[in-house]
Image: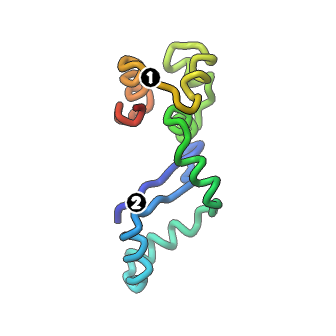
Amino acid sequence: MEYQTIKENGKVKFIVLPVNVFNRLIKNSGNVSDLEAIELASTEPLYDQEEAEDYIFLNPVKRERLEKGWTQTELAHRMKVKQSTIAKWERQGAVYRNATRKKFAEVFGAPESSFI
């Protein structure tokens, strides 16, 4: 089953399903593996739409940092920059140099394209 989990502090905060997968799950709820997936997802707390959208559309650096459970200071140490630089990079609409995107990819273990 294709789905995406969004984590905060190392714990799953959201599960995102494509609409066609969700519709299939609802329609075929007799399928044991699908029911197990729904059961597993249902153990996670629910969040309202506004909170979910705020989190999904977070600045990519902040989202990755929160998913790892790191503070700005911890990320600054890993990036070998000041904490104030991390705060600047986490602002909405921040633009990153190619070298910075490469470093984010290394530190977070995420594709460089996540930071465009």
Amino acid type of disc 1? Tyr
Image location (x, y in percent) of residue 50 = 63, 55
Q: Which mark is residue 3?
A: 2
Question: Gap in Å between the C-alphas at discs 2 and 1?
Answer: 28 Å
Q: Which colouring convention does the figure follow?
A: rainbow
Image quadrant holding the N terminus, namely bottom left
Image location (x, y in percent) of residue 55 = 58, 47
Specify few, some or many for label 2: CA neighbours under 10 Å numbering under 14, 14-19, or 20 or more. few
Which residue is nearer to you in this view: 57 or 32?
A: 57
Tell me where residue 111 sits by quadrant.
top left
Q: Which mark is residue 30?
A: none
Q: Residue at x 63, y 17 (%)?
A: 84
Image location (x, y in percent) of residue 18 = 39, 63
> Up-down: is 68 above or below 34?
above
Image quadrant holding the C terminus, namely top left
> Up-down: is 27 above or below 22?
below
> Up-down: is 55 above or below 31?
above
Amino acid type of disc 2? Tyr
Q: Residue at x 52, y 31 (%)?
A: 93
Outermost residue toward the top?
81
Image location (x, y in percent) of residue 107 = 43, 26
Q: Residue at x 49, y 18 (%)?
A: 79
Tell me where residue 25 sits by quadrant.
bottom left
Q: Residue at x 64, y 60 (%)?
A: 47
**Label 2 SS:** loop
Disc 2 or 1, which lies upstream in sequence?
A: 2
Nearer to us: label 2 or label 1: 1
For label 1, the residue is 96
Determine whether label 2 and label 1 are within 8 Å by CB: no
Which residue is nearer to you in this view: 100 or 34?
A: 100
Which residue is nearer to you in this view: 76 or 52?
A: 52
